[in-house]
Amino acid sequence: MKVLAIDTSNHTLGLALVDETTVVGEYITNLKKNHSVRVMPAIEMLLNDCGVKPKELTKIVVAKGPGSYTGVRIGLTIAKTLAWSLNIPVVGISSLALVAGVGRYFDGYISPLFDARRGQIYTGLYGFDSDGLNTIKQDQNVMAVDWAESLTTLNKNVLFVGNDTAMHRAAIAEILGDKAVFAEFTENNPRPSELALLGMHEVGDDLHSLVPNYIRLVEAEAKWLVAQQNQDHE
C-alpha cells in the first residue's frame, strides 16, 4: 500500500509517501508562502525522487482542518482531484489529530493547538493507548484561557504542541502551572508521515461529502448570515 499524505492546512507544507511500514519520503517546510503554487511541484518532486509513479498510489490522506481557510481548501481540492483521477480512496483527517502524533509516548494528554486570533485557539484533547490515538475532547474553537481552565480538573499532565503554542504559553502556564508541558520547537511541525499513518487503514471518504472542517464560519459567511437574520426580522 502506497499512501500519499498532504497537509497544507497551516503555514507548514507537508507531504509524505509511506509504503506499508516504511516512510519512503517526506517533505516539510514551515514558510508563509503560497501553497497553491508550491504543492503540486513538491508532490511531483517527492514522487520522482522516490521512484514512484502516480498510478502506483493506493490511497490519498489529507489534513481537512481546522486551520487556514485557504490552506485547507487547497489541500482538499488537490487530494480529491488526485483521488478522482487515479480512482483511489481519499481520507480526510483532523489537522489537530495530526499534530497530536508527536505525543505518542507522552504520559498524559495531548492538546495540539493553532492560533485563531483574538485570544482564541483551535484545539482538542487527545491521548494514546494500545489502540492508537483517541479523542478525549472534540476539536473546537475556544478562548485559550477558557480551554486551560477546563483542563484544571484533569489528573494528568497535558502536552501542548503546535507552531502557535508560544503565542499562548504564558496564559496557559499561568492557569495550569506544572500540569502544562510544552513541546520542544523541533516537535511543533506536523509530520505528514503521521498523517499517512492515521489514515492508512481508514475507509475512504465520499469524494462529494468530504469538505473542510473549519470549526467556525469564515468571517464573510458569518457576516452574511447575520445580515440575513437582521433582514428577516425587518
Image (tube, helix red, strand yellow):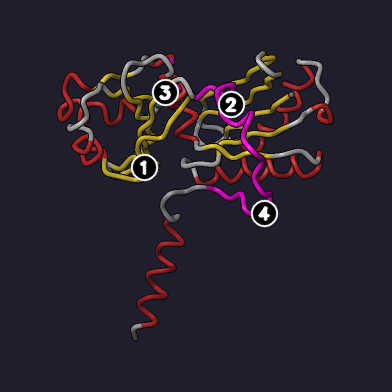
Mark 4 in CB contact with mark 1 (< 8 angstroms): no
Q: Residues within 10 Å of mark 4 (few under 14, many from 20)?
A: few
- Report the residue marked by disc 2: 14
- Horizontal side of 160 relative to 24 (left or right) equals left
Q: Alpha carbon of mark 2 to alpha carbon of mark 3: how far?
A: 23 Å
| Of labels 2 and 3, the one closer to you | 3
Q: Alpha carbon of mark 1 to alpha carbon of mark 2: how far?
A: 21 Å
- Report the residue marked by disc 4: 208
- The residue lying at 70 percent from left, 26 percent from top is 3
Q: Residues within 10 Å of mark 2 (few under 14, many from 20)?
A: many
| Of labels 3 and 4, the one closer to you | 3
Kind of residue at disc 4: His
**Does dot 2 land on a helix, a strand or a loop?**
strand
Mark 3 in CB contact with mark 4 (< 8 angstroms): no
Kind of residue at disc 2: Gly
- The residue lying at 64 percent from left, 28 percent from top is 200
Q: Residues within 10 Å of mark 1 (few under 14, many from 20)?
A: some
| Total tally of numbered discs in the picture | 4
Kind of residue at disc 3: Phe
Q: Is residue 22 above or below residue 56?
A: above
- Report the residue marked by disc 1: 116
**Does dot 3 land on a helix, a strand or a loop?**
strand
User: Of callouts 4 and 2, which one flags the residue occurring earlier in the amino acid sequence?
Assistant: 2
